[in-house]
Amino acid sequence: MLAAFVSSFHPRALHPMLRRNYGRELGAWLLLPFMLAGIQGGSMGVVLKKTFTGVEGLPDASVDFAVACIAAATAIGNLTSGVWASLANGRRKVPFLVGLMLATSGCVGLMATIPVTAFGAWMLVALVVVGWVFWSGVVTIRTTVWRANYPDADRATIAGRITTVQVLVMAFAGATLGWALDRSVESFRPIFGTIALLGLAGAMVYRGVRLRGQSRLARAERSGHASERPGINPLSALRVLGDDRRYAAYMACMMLFGFGNLMIMPTLAIIVKDEFDLGYLDSLLLTSVIPLVVMPFAIPLWARLLSRLHVISFRTVHSWTFVLASGLFLAAVETHALPLLFIASAALGLGFAGGMLAWNLGHQHFAPPHRDAQYMSVHVMLTGLRGLAAPFLGVALYTWLAARGHPGLVYAVSLILNITGAFGFLSLRAWERRRARRATA
């Protein structure tokens, strides 16, 4: 069974026309996730919290605020998605992506020079944020490559395989980082240097990917009406949402649902230190490794479901995994039950598995091909807006509730938001079905 699972990732499992690009992408994604461990919010929040707590000139409240900044780094990067989509419009996508991968690897490499001081803590925050600014361009543009290179029937499966490889490598990198730091805090220097080099190697492998119909796509992007092009101005997102009410309703549900999810990780990075006093490895297992290890087992199931359903119907099923996870976190922290905390982390990985697929591919259920990057940039930007606010609200709520003896109640807020979002998707599916019946009447 294991052999069949592994062999399913081989390029020979696909149609011959898809093998070359898929093989090169797979090779790149065996290397790039090592580098991504250096900007991954769950891992780096723990590294900052445990490494810099007690450092002279850095109060505990400042450390917690810095953890929230790291959690918000993804969102800050996402807010620049419109810039990258606009810059890539009409240009060759693969070289553009390679440049962004190299820039992100450079940020991770600089982490090897950070001193364990108050200045070093904020330098770490800045490098994670800048790294995510570059990486958000990769996230925004690579879906255009997937859409051009892989047909609809295969795209979710291929994206699932690439995502599976990515999360397994990131889990291994996170566990190695925790193991090494438990033995010597200074070991972060050679580790960050090494994973940055692996990121550079992954970018070089990705250079071999060829985008099918590159010239035709570039002409379509350049010749399209100005309103159909991705724009640097955030108001361009309002035009997209105003023109496509179905997509606007989907984004509204995602805003509620996603806000609750984005409060979980930054508070968990603080809770494992303040409430459970865990070491580096155990902390990284909870905040990063366990969710990532669960994902490869869940991704194929979610990929099959997404291949059969519109993303709205998919979300009506998938959203309840986050409801389960936030409820388990609430119970685990309030009862101080460490084993339940590990179960909650696994449930979170189940939700992340489906969420990663739907997040990368869901907009394509709404966008015409030449507006793919524009729709994706809107999705990424709105994720950035909620991701910018949620970590700080979560940390502020945790601080206030912990002082009153109930730190776990921060997850009650996540639970309420997740349930509201889940019911929103159900309402949106009912609206879609009524719309389809009227169209066929």
Image (spheres, rainbow, N blue to C red):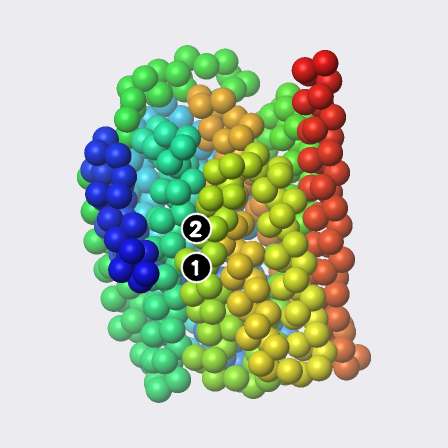
The reply, left or right, for residue 293 in relation to residue 344 is left
Q: Is any atom of residue 76 visible in this view?
A: no
Position of 294 relative to 366 (above/below): below
Position of 162 relative to 189 (above/below): above
Q: Name the residue carrying label 2.
A: 300
Q: Is any atom of residue 416 visible in this view?
A: yes
Position of 134 relative to 412 (above/below): above
Towards the viewer: 161 or 95: 161
Towards the viewer: 351 or 15: 15
Which numbered disc covers residue 239? none
Towards the viewer: 424 or 111: 424
Q: Decide: marks 2, 1 in contact (CB < 8 A)? A: yes
Q: Name the residue carrying label 1.
A: 297
Residue at 66% over, 28% down = 246
Residue at 56% over, 56% down = 351
Quadrant in the rendering for residue 424: top right
Residue at 27% over, 39% down = 14
On-image quarter of the C terminus = top right
The reply, left or right, for residue 255 in relation to residue 13 is right
Secondary structure beneath label 2: helix
The reply, left or right, for residue 52 in relation to residue 26 is right
Q: Disc 1 marks which amino acid?
A: Phe
Between the residue at mark 2 and the residue at mark 1, the CA separation in whole angstroms equals 7 Å
The reply, left or right, for residue 79 in relation to residue 415 is left
Q: Where does residue 156 sit, x and y in percent of width and height?
A: 43, 40
Q: Where does residue 264 sit, x and y in percent of width and height?
A: 62, 64
